[in-house]
Every structure is written in structure tokens, then in C-alpha cells.
């Protein structure tokens, strides 16, 4: 996410760091690079121009230029202006009188159907959502929604004549398309009432482009079930076209929110920065993966922090909490992280807990400073390496795990053979362990980023 932009902004501020006190010319040169970086990241031209102008106005003040930490002050200004550009985070509208109706719209291929189930799963912890298949022109869309809903264990309603239960809730099995979209919506309303569903999420038909037929259908649906939220699902990888699509839908529907999909795979991501400024519609959620749990409330502060290379500690903490690591009976105790108590058993626990957090390359992006490690590459954060290191420790005897000093030549060969690795790989893991043991107490100090590399088992 924003990899190229983050890298280029980091280079800009590295140049400023080497200059000490800054002149107005230094700032202008740096902001030219910032503007170019924003445009290359697919940020709207007018948005990039206005953003840089605001940054310059604040950066050339006497207070900043006279400061010996001017480069840090300018970085802070850029961070604050990025947050201002993306606007305040706005929560989903939940009606005090159920059901809350959410209308999902979007072009074909935007990820609308998947996002519908993701949103239902997100709401499932505090509500009883029902997803409704309203895309009757594409049979695969109805079946896709039904399958995803079953896997996410949320209620589903679609164009069929018989009811059939599924795990986690009840559903209408897809048997045919004898009903019209409006009949499906009316039936869904009754189904929600009888099954105590307090949130109804309507997965409407997608199009290759906006047309009168689509808009008429959406307006007719809204008359039967007036939506509290009209959310457009936008593919962030299509760049400026995402902004244009949002503008067109908003003019016709008066949108209340946006979901940006595929942010995890977009190295540019400029649409995430531009879309609020151009349309005035808040981004409410971000799709950050293919699984039905890969939906996050959109946070301008966290997004700006990632762009500026500041990491996302809040996001990381939420993943730790969601994984149940802190409350797990197998959680690592503070006493295990110091002195003689820090053993290879402790390291094995760390590896097992890291696996619960999700793809390691995404976790690494949340850690402040990790990308500033010399020669660090995202590819170094490899689940295969983590599994390999786990296999090495699991091939040791309990005594060897507690006292690695006894692991000499013959033991290392046995461990390598038992784990399907090499003696060199065993040596690498033991070296990492020794480094961690010496440095763990100073983990939060200036060498923190370097130690994180050992903690995650990086390096080949």
C-alpha cells in the first residue's frame, strides 16, 4: 500500500535531514519532489497542487525555517495535511429504529459483492446482518454472494422459492430468477423482520458503466427500502477512473460513504488520497485482502502514518487483540523475555503468535522504522522462513531448547536433518536467538528496528 509514494517521500526527507537549517529554496526543491511523487502515485492533479500549496504556506513560516529541526517540522506538516486531505473518519450510520438499510453500489469488478459480505461480517459482532442478492442479471453474482455469506456465517436472501438453512444463519437457496429485483427486496424486508435481522445490506447490480437503467433500478429499490447508507465500492487500483466513477455515482445517488477495495495490492493508491477531496464523500472502509475479514474502518491518521513511514501501531495492536494473543493461556509472560528465562521455547511461541496475525509482509508495514533498515526488503518477511525456523526449533530436544549452548556440531547436523534444512540455517537461527537475548531489554531504544528484524525471523 503506497509503497512507491512512501519510498519517494522518505528520500525527500532524507535529503532535508542532511542540510541542517533550511532555506526557502530548499523547501521549494523538496516540495517539487513531493508534488511529482503525488502525481506519480495517481493523486488528482488539482488535489496535489492544493496540498503542496498548503504545505508550503506553513513550511516557509519563520518559526519553521529558524528551527534546527526544520526537516522534522516539515515532515509533521506533510503528515497533518495528508490527514486533513482525507478528512475525518466517519462511522457507519446505524438507525436507532431497525432495520438499518445499506445499499451497496459499484461498477462490475470493483469487489462489490465481496465487500457486501465483508461488511456483514464486520457488523456481525454487534448486529444481525442480512445480505440480499439484488444483481439478477448475473447469476454468478447471486451464487457468489450466497457462498460467501455461508462461509462468513451471515444470513442470505436471494431470488428463490424455497428456504434452506446454512451454517450460521438461514438462507434462501438459489433456484431460479422468477422474481424481479423489487420482489426480492420486498421479500428480504419480510425475511429480516421474521429473523430479527437489524441490518439489511443490498448487493445491487454492477455495470460496466453508469446507465439510466441502473440508476432507475437503484432508485426503485430505495423507494421500497429507503437506505440509511448509500455506499459506493470503488476499485482503488484503477487510479483516476476511481475518482471519476465516484463523482458520477455521487451526482446521481447522493452517496453517504465509500469503500476502497484492493488497497493492499495497489503500490500507488492515489485515489485514496484524492477521492474525499474531489467528491466530498467520506471513505468509511478499506478492503485490505481477499478474505471476508479483510475490511478495516478507514482511518486518515493511520493511512497518513503508513504513507510517511511511521507504521501503524494502532492497527498492529488491533490485530494482536483480534488474534487473542494477549489473553491466550500460551501468551508470552514478561518474565520470559529477559535473562536466562528467554529460551528457544519462548522464540517458538513468538513465531506461533506471529502466524496468527496474518500475512507477515502486511504486519511488517505496520511496524515503525522497519522499512528504514538498511537493505530491508518486504520479501524478507516471508511466512516460509517463519515456518522453517519453527521446524528447526521443533526438531530440538526440550533440553536443547532450554539450553542452546549445548547445541554443537553433531547436534546441529541432527537438527538440520530433522527439520529438512541445512546446518547453515540452524546456525543463522541460533545467531538470531543470541542477538535477541542480549538486546531484548533495549528493544525500544535506538536499535529497535534492527532488533525487530531478528524478532520476526528475517534473513535467509
Image: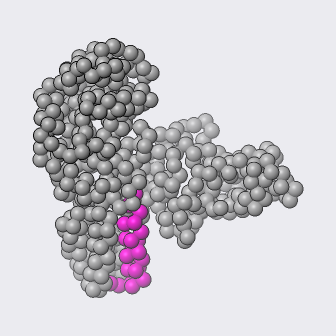
- Residue 278 located left or right of residue 78: left
Give the residue at x 40% y 48%: 288
Quadrant occupied by the C terminus: bottom right
Q: Position of residue 236 (x, y in %)?
A: 31, 53
Q: Is residue 352 visible?
A: yes
The span picked out in magenta is 1-22
For the view shown, which residue lies furthest in the right direction? 410
Q: Position of residue 342 (x, y in %)?
A: 69, 52
Asked if the magenta segment contains residue 4, the reply would be yes
Quadrant occupied by the N terminus: bottom left
- Residue 149 located left or right of residue 281: right
Give the residue at x 62% y 44%: 352
- Residue 152 located left or right of residue 243: right
- 405, 239: nearer the viewer: 239
- 123, 164: nearer the viewer: 164
Q: Position of residue 251 (x, y in %)?
A: 12, 47
Q: Is residue 86 visible?
A: no
Vertical placement of residue 288 versus 161, above or below: below
Give the residue at x 20% y 70%: 49
Give the residue at x 21% y 50%: 245
Q: Position of residue 238 (x, y in %)?
A: 30, 55
Vertical placement of residue 23 versus 38, above or below: below
Amino acid at each position: 500500500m503506497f509503497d512507491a509514494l512512501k519510498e519517494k517521500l522518505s528520500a525527500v526527507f532524507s535529503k532535508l535531514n542532511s542540510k541542517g537549517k533550511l532555506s526557502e529554496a530548499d523547501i521549494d526543491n523538496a516540495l517539487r519532489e513531493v508534488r511529482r511523487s503525488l502525481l506519480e502515485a495517481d493523486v488528482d492533479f488539482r488535489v496535489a497542487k492544493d496540498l503542496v500549496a498548503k504545505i508550503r504556506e506553513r513550511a516557509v513560516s519563520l518559526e519553521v525555517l529558524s528551527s534546527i529541526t526544520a526537516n522534522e517540522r516539515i515532515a509533521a506538516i506533510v503528515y497533518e495535511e495528508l490527514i486533513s486531505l482525507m478528512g475525518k473518519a466517519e462511522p457507519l450510520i446505524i438507525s436507532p429504529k431497525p432495520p438499518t438499510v445499506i445499499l451497496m453500489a459499484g461498477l462490475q469488478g470493483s469487489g462489490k459483492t465481496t465487500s457486501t459480505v465483508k461488511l456483514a461480517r464486520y457488523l456481525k459482532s454487534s448486529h444481525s446482518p442480512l445480505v440480499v442478492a439484488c444483481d439478477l442479471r448475473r447469476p454468478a453474482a447471486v451464487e457468489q454472494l450466497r457462498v460467501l455469506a455461508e462461509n462468513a456465517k451471515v444470513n442470505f436472501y436471494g431470488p428463490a422459492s424455497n428456504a434452506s438453512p446454512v451454517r450460521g444463519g438461514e438462507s434462501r437457496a438459489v433456484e431460479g430468477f422468477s422474481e424481479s429485483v423489487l420482489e426480492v427486496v420486498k421479500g428480504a424486508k419480510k425475511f429480516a423482520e421474521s429473523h430479527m435481522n437489524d441490518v439489511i445490506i443490498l448487493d445491487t447490480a454492477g455495470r460496466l458503466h453508469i446507465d439510466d437503467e441502473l440508476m432507475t433500478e437503484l432508485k426503485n429499490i430505495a423507494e421500497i427500502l429507503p437506505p440509511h447508507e448509500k455506499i459506493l465500492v470503488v476499485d482503488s487500483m484503477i487510479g483516476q477512473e476511481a475518482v471519476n466513477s465516484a463523482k458520477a455515482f455521487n451526482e446521481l445517488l447522493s452517496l453517504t460513504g465509500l469503500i476502497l477495495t484492493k488497497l493492499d495490492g495497489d503500490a500507488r493508491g492515489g485515489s485514496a488520497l484524492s477521492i474525499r477531496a474531489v467528491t466530498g464523500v467520506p471513505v468509511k472502509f478499506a478492503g485490505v485482502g481477499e478474505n471476508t475479514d479483510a475490511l478495516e474502518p478507514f482511518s486518515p491518521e493511520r493511512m497518513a502514518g503508513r504513507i510517511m513511514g511511521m507504521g501503524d501501531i494502532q492497527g498492529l495492536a488491533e490485530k494482536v487483540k483480534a488474534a487473542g494473543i494477549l489473553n491466550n493461556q500460551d501468551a508470552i509472560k514478561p518474565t520470559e523475555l529477559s535473562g536466562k528465562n528467554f529460551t528457544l521455547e519462548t522464540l517458538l511461541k513468538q513465531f506461533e503468535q506471529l502466524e496468527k496475525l496474518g500475512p507477515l509482509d502486511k504486519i511488517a508495514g505496520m511496524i515503525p522504522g522497519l522499512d528504514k533498515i538498511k537493505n530491508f526488503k518486504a520479501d524478507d518477511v516471508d511466512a516460509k522462513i517463519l515456518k522453517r525456523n519453527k521446524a528447526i526449533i521443533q526438531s530440538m530436544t526440550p533440553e536443547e531448547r532450554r539450553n542452546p549452548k549445548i547445541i554443537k556440531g553433531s547436534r546441529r547436523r541432527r537438527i538440520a536433518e530433522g527439520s529438512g534444512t541445512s546446518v547453515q540455517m540452524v546456525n543463522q537461527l541460533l545467531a538470531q536467538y543470541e542477538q535477541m537475548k542480549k538486546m531484548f531489554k533495549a528493544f525500544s531504544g535506538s536499535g529497535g528496528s534492527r532488533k525487530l528484524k531478528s524478532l520476526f525471523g528475517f534473513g535467509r
